[in-house]
Image (spheres, rainbow, N blue to C red):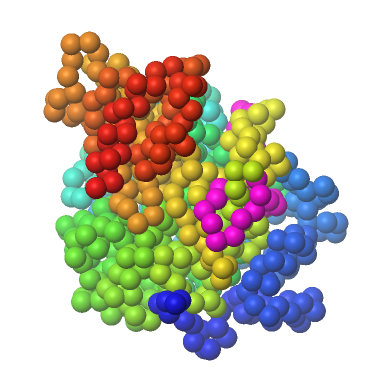
Amino acid sequence: MPTPPLWTPTAEDVARARLTDYQRWLARERGLTFASYDALWRWSVTDLDAFWRSIWDYFALDGGAPPGPALTPPGTMPGARWFEGATLNYAERVFAMANAHPALLFRSETTPDQTVSWEALRAAVASVASELRALGVSAGDRVAAYLPNTPHALIAFLATASLGAIWSSCSPDIGAVSVIDRFSQIAPKVLFAIDGYVYNGKPFDRAEVVDALGDALPGLEAVVHVPYLHAPASPATRARLEALGGRRRTLDWTAMAGHTDAALTFTRVPFDHPLWVLYSSGTTGLPKPITQSQGGILLEHLKQCGLHLDLSPGDRFFWFTTTGWMMWNLLIGGLLVGATVVAYDGSPAAAALGGMSALWKLAADTGVTCFGASAAYIAACMKAGYRPTSEYPLPALRCVGSTGSPLPPEGFAWVYDAVKTDVWLASISGGTDVCTAFVGGVPTLPVHAGEIQARCLGADVQAFDEAGQPISDAVGELVLTRPMPSMPVFFWNDPDMRRYRDSYFDVYPGVWRHGDWVRITPRGGAVIYGRSDSTINRQGVRIGTSEIYRAVEAVDGVQDSLIIDLEMLGRPSYLALFVVPQPGIAVDDALREAIRARIRATLSARQLPDDIFEIAEVPRTLNGKKMEVPIKKILLGQPVEKAVSQGSMANPAALDAFTALARRLAR
């Protein structure tokens, strides 16, 4: 017997939703009517040209869509070309949505609360853009940022985008080696760098990391010092500016953002001109420098923020994120539809800001209407026994968003029991690779426990079986059979697109394979069952195993290693590290701590394993490749004979340790 939904939108909810307004617009302007969301979705993935042109026109992008097709024939992947001949600018659209509400509300462990008006945001962006222009930054140049989720990051990004330059950011909780691995690939001309930050009451100075970045990045011409841990006029800031100035050209953020007479102008660029470079790691090599376009992101985030998250001027949009996660990029996309962005920097359980109540207090204090966080954060609230409703009624809250990993049914139940009974829970899933969700929230549909509401408009998500055929109500590979505008235009430094093709199209030619297990339910919803490959997903941030191996195998006493992420629906995230010690060495507490310290220093605390096991050898193929995916399948309970062909192994006996562990995990 079907279980009843946890939440059903009222007739008033449906009538006021922007998705309903869009459907009314389609009927009025295009003569198109749809009896259900599913019918609308099917049209959106069947007639891509008409759908994406309608998004351009409905959201009134300046100048209207250019003549000619939205998707240039034949529209195959990779290499689909969109809106050829169109020119636009992301930052120009942002400021076209200025209104009487604040542009940004900000809370931090490091500084007092801030409210930034649209007027103040425009003035700061104009000032920073003028200084970047004076440094010689123009369309196509790269600007990197080692910044937390602060107003500085938003201002610097919009200034960069206004010039047609290309943005890339890393969160300052990431160590120097990992940041260099990312930024060195794109050779930025300018680096915005924070002095430090406070996390859970503890200050972290980043001067040594910034110096290492400056020395390692090829072609870097200037560093912009952003005082945050220390006051702008403090002796520490003055000393740091002097030290930086002795190494390379250095600008002071306070002066850079303080001009009041700068005019903000916008460089319009072609639709496929790069907007930013994000990073997502594979199993080998450096992190993938995923390059997404101004036009593709602009259209996709208008659709996602406007129709799927139901944001409009007057809404207050919060997502707990850092600048190193794509949710920061989606969060600031709220400005594209005129919503107020609510940003937070610090621990989600900062003692000085209320402990486990910190983010919920922020929501109450700022009147957040859409509150987003990772599934891991919701699980942490559950584990702590915390109930926001006992402290904060949250009358303005209409939507709770969850992403980063699968949210189990218990997480859904907690939201309706401990947060608010009358709230729309928008569980979403997508990826850095497209900087959006493939499956997600629909404000006009019911919410069922453990199930994402629907496939997003314009995203032709299917579940494929091993033969590459679509299946229904069964677990298969999540694929997209038609292109989306926010797919990468290329990977940086991948001129023949070989790495791009190998990342998404090596299994099903012409079909995007994302690397997740998914089941499409009979009512059109989706259930994500975790990664189908060996990429690690920690709190929504994906990192390649190669980065873990570089860190672990540099530790004295470690000979070899294997890392397995056992993310799976209904289970806590579990990251297991298997270590082969050097002869005569034991994997004892001291070695375990040395490994954790190395990971924390070179990557971040987010990538720390839950357990470290000693093994005699790493299972390898005949050509020496670590067998990550087969071992993951074994640990998740798949019989050995189905998970791996032992005839293709160099050392079949190495499986014994993992089959024994699988039996323990199953108990």
Residue at image point 69% right, 39% down: 509
Residue 224 horizontal/vertical position (percent): 42, 38
Whether residue 601 can be seen here:
no
**Residue lying farthest to the bottom in this orientation:** 11
Position of 246 with respect to 528 (left or right) is: left
Q: Is residue 484 magenta?
A: yes
* Left or right: 485 in relation to 395: right
Q: Residue 32 at x, y = what percent?
A: 77, 77
Q: Which residues are magenta?
A: 468-494
* In the rendered image, the vertical position of residue 214 relative to residue 140, given as above or below: above
Compare residues 392 and 194 and report the one nearer the observer. Answer: 392
Q: Nearer the viewer, residue 372 or 381?
A: 381
Q: Is residue 659 magenta?
A: no
* Residue sticking out furthest to the top: 583
* Residue found at x 71% / y 78%: 34
Residue 203 position in % (x across, y down): 21, 43
Residue beneath the point at 37% across and 43% down: 636
